[in-house]
Image (cartoon, helix red, strand yellow):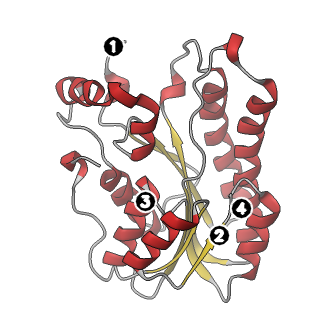
Amino acid sequence: MSGDGARPGGAPGELGGQTVVVMGGSAGIGLETARRVRAAGGELVLVARDPERLRRAADELRPLSTAAFDAFDTERTERFLDELPGRIDHVLVTAGSPAYTPLDDLDLTDAGRDFGGRLAMVLAVARASRGKVRPGGALLFIGGTGGRRPAPGMAVTGALTAALPALVANLALEVAPVRVCLIAAGFVDTPLSASLLGDRLDARREELRRTLPIGRVVGPADVAALAVHLMVNDALTGATYDIDGGQQLLAH
């Protein structure tokens, strides 16, 4: 992560006595949000696919517990949440990554798994959370804004970008008084972004610093601060919250 996104958020004690499950908590936005939760006095349960990265995150953050599995395994996800001891306060899910594949190169089986698997994961978390997350607690899902502009290679990502806000709005009614919100991020300077862009990463950073209205690149800490705010502010549910530094305001 570059230093662009280091901004304060999550006041000390703001989450005191609360437990937050972070699914995808070993890197990027998930890891940074877990750090904010700890700084705000909260306890953590960390979930990630990679056992080694999860161990390193646990060494730093000292969570109540950890679990290594793929959140797209909906049966495992529901069982995991159901078996957590006692009530929890919030769940953040960062699992899943955008797919940028032109139609001619698209594997339809993979496309179906990417699209259906992402929606099924959200549904599984919501269903399992009804009896586990306290009233007024929050389910937070990370999505994106890039798919709002049609472009070659964006068919699957664009469809998910359109579907997730509708899914979250409906779930906010079905699982109330548990709250459900979607964070729609633009470019965020994370290891995932680095892996997707490769040797084009530095040029993309420089372009964003030059063109974004905020004059800097959005970092994981910015998204983490928003996530903690959504946990704390119990008047918020059913909506999508954009965080892209004004990227959508720019002409393309």
Residue 85 or 199: which is nearer the viewer? 199
- Identify the residue at image location x=72%, y=36%: 115
Q: Say above or below: 203 vs 36.
A: above
What residue is pinned by disc 2?
177
- Label 2: which secondary element: loop
What residue is pinned by disc 3?
227
Q: CA distance from mark 4 to mark 3?
A: 17 Å
Q: Say above or below: 191 vs 104.
A: below
Task: Give the amino acid at mark 4.
Answer: Ala
- Identify the residue at image location x=46%, y=76%: 58
What residue is pinned by disc 1?
251
- Label 1: which secondary element: loop
- Label 4: which secondary element: helix
Task: Give the amino acid at mark 3.
Answer: Ala
Q: CA distance from mark 1 to mark 3?
A: 28 Å
- Relative placement, left or right, of 222 versus 108 is left
What residue is pinned by disc 4?
126
- Identify the residue at image location x=36%, y=82%: 41
Res 135 seen here: yes
Q: CA distance from mark 2 to mark 3?
A: 18 Å
Task: Give the amino acid at mark 2.
Answer: Pro
- Identify the residue at image location x=35%, y=69%: 36
Q: CA distance from mark 4 to mark 2?
A: 12 Å
